[in-house]
Amino acid sequence: LRQQQQNAAEKALEMGHRSADLQQHLADSQAKAHDELQDRLLDQHEQQKKMELLREQYNTGVPPVVGVTVDGAKGLTSPTRGNKISTYCVIEVVNKPYTRLQTPELQGPMPLWDYTGVLSKVGFGDVLKFAVYRKEPVVEVDHTA
């Protein structure tokens, strides 16, 4: 009987420690979730402030300047050259071809351009277009017969 009481007491103590561990884990999880929510709210507030500034600039006739970064691309191939291709990316505001930016040409199916450029004369609500092109070698054809 004494052994059973001792086992029960040890089990109760173990369950008390486990309960304390779970409560601490829950408190830590809640604190982490709270911090992540605060960070999101701050980011959202900063984005709203930026949008308000862009609207204000646009309404006062000052065209906003937009920074654009192109990291790279994956899985590019060519039907004629396979993975041995040369590619580049073109960025422009839709219906405004004079805003065109172009990355340097790079070889391979996974180019890492890490290119940053600036687009000016961007209107509020304009849409950016990113297009990746491959440069095929020119094949000369002899037209003499």
Image: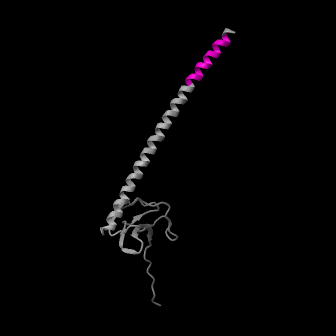
Residue at x 48%, y 60% (from the top left corner): 74
Q: Return the residue nearer the eye: 57 or 28.
A: 57
Q: Quadrant of the N terminus?
A: top right
The x and y percentages for residue 82 are 50, 66
User: What span is in magenta?
Assistant: 3-17
Image quarter of residue 88: bottom left
Seen in the picture, residue 136 relative to 46 is either above or below; the reply is below
Q: Return the residue nearer the eye: 30 or 18.
A: 30
| Residue 39 visible here | yes
Image quarter of residue 114: bottom left
In the current view of this chain or complex, which residue is farthest to the bottom? 145
| Residue 66 visible here | no
How are the residues colored?
A: one colour
Residue at x 43%, y 44% (from the top left corner): 38
In the current view of this chain or complex, which residue is farthest to the right? 1
Is 43 covered by the magenta stretch? no
The x and y percentages for residue 46 are 37, 53
Left or right side of 20 for 99 = left
Seen in the picture, residue 126 relative to 26 is either above or below; the reply is below
Chief SS of the magenta region: helix
The x and y percentages for residue 131 are 44, 68
Residue at x 62%, y 19% (from the top left corner): 11
Q: How many marks?
A: 0
Residue at x 36%, y 64% (from the top left corner): 55
Q: Return the residue nearer the eye: 1 or 74.
A: 1
